Image: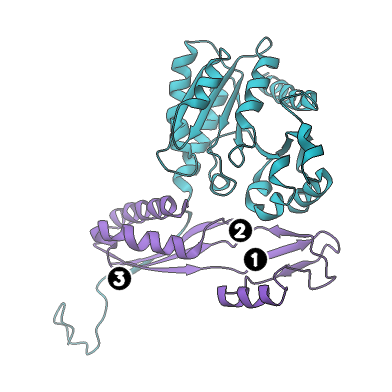
Chain colours: A cyan, B purple
Amino acid sequence: MCDTCGCQLHEHHHHDTKVVEVNRSLLEANQKQAESNRHHIEHMGAVAINLISSPGSGKTTLLERTIDELKASCSIGVIEGDIETERDADRIRAKGVPAVQLTTGGACHLDAPMVHGGLHVLEHFAKGRPLDLIFIENVGNLVCPATFDLGEHRRVVLLSTPEGSDKPAKYPATFKSADLMLITKVDLLPHFDFSVEEAAGQARALKPELEIITLSATTGDGFAGWLAYLRGLLAQRTAHEH
Amino acid sequence: MHELSLAQSLIEQILALAAEHRARRVNRVVVTLGPFSGVVRDSFEFGFNILKQEQEPVREAVLELETPDPEYVCRDCDKVAVIPFPRQSERLELARCGLAAKKCPWCGSNRLSPRGGTELILNQLEME
């Protein structure tokens, strides 16, 4: 007899057990927020770029020079993700651009809800000035950020020459998820055993259509290509609006 | 490292579905982890089993993970190959024999590009 209800079945049977087919992504909540962030950013009239790389590959230095080069022609805002400190946001603010520091307190990546909060604070810092270009500098990590859409329009992965040209093969998820790979610190090429050809070959094996630009934010070498890429995005945005 | 936050969002999703279906408890949870989802199976399972203790409706829930084999497209011969990930013990053995690198079974090239496999899906819940 079933112990639960006292019915006369000899074997135990489940009470109102039901199986529900769900078939939903575990990232659903993040994805919804990311879509809403994208909508929010487009409503602001801006384009957003998610910068992903390992720590120390030059994300903030890239931004500093990009701001210097573009500040006169477009208005930029930055959301900085780090585990601790305001150091990066302070560096960006020193360039006269609004910057929000998101400190994750240990989390290895930014997610869409964090960026949502960041967007509101960024608008507050921008004091009503419309923004054209929003950079979201992710936590330095070549693994976890790949999984989380933040609501960006383009995902850019940086690979600096001291890291070695084997990184795309070692961290495939991140490089495959990117729209553009920037090979940074090319001024250091003579000092490191880094092959641009090998890095590009490995990255394109993962994603044949991946765009690749090599540059140095210190010397400005190759920087024109990056600025042209950004201007192209801004032009597309304008075309889209009309 | 991000497995814990994914396990947390899974639990939130399950609790919402349990409430929607007026279920008292959840017995079984079936999840698909794509081979290129960037999620480490053991860490995800560990995270889920820790976090479920905090929520009565899922405390007894058993997590069943489905992990489809990875598929690759060969950049040299264009053929598709399904190459299962070796088990941890086998990986060490392969490494010892210098065979750890994946190769296209059709032409021997090592220029393999992962195809699909980034899914992280809550498939099925059994609840009462």
Q: Residues within 10 Å of mark 3 (few under 14, many from 20)?
A: some
- Mark 1 on the same chain as mark 3: no
Q: Position of residue A179 (x, y in %)?
A: 70, 39
| Residues under numbered marks 1 and 3 in contact, where contact means CB atoms less than 8 Å apart | no
Amino acid at the residue labelled 1? Pro
User: In front: mark 1 or mark 3?
Assistant: 1
Q: Earlier in the sequence, mark 2 or mark 1?
A: 2
The CA distance from mark 1 to mark 3 is 34 Å
Amino acid at the residue labelled 2? Phe
Label at residue B70: 1
**Callout 2 secondary element:** loop
Residue picked out by circle 3: A17
Marked residue chain, label 1: B
Residue sitting at 67 percent across and 21 percent down? A66
Tell me if residue B112 comes above or below residue A175 in the rendering: below
| Residues under numbered marks 2 and 1 in contact, where contact means CB atoms less than 8 Å apart | yes
The answer to which image quadrant residue B36 occupies is bottom right
**Callout 1 secondary element:** loop
Residue picked out by circle 2: B36
The CA distance from mark 3 to mark 2 is 33 Å
Q: Count up the numbered dots.
A: 3
**Callout 3 secondary element:** loop
Q: Position of residue B63 (x, y in %)?
A: 40, 67
Tell me if residue A171 comes above or below residue A120 in the rendering: below
Residue sitting at 64 percent across and 32 percent down? A58
> On the picture, is B23 further left or further right than A77?
left
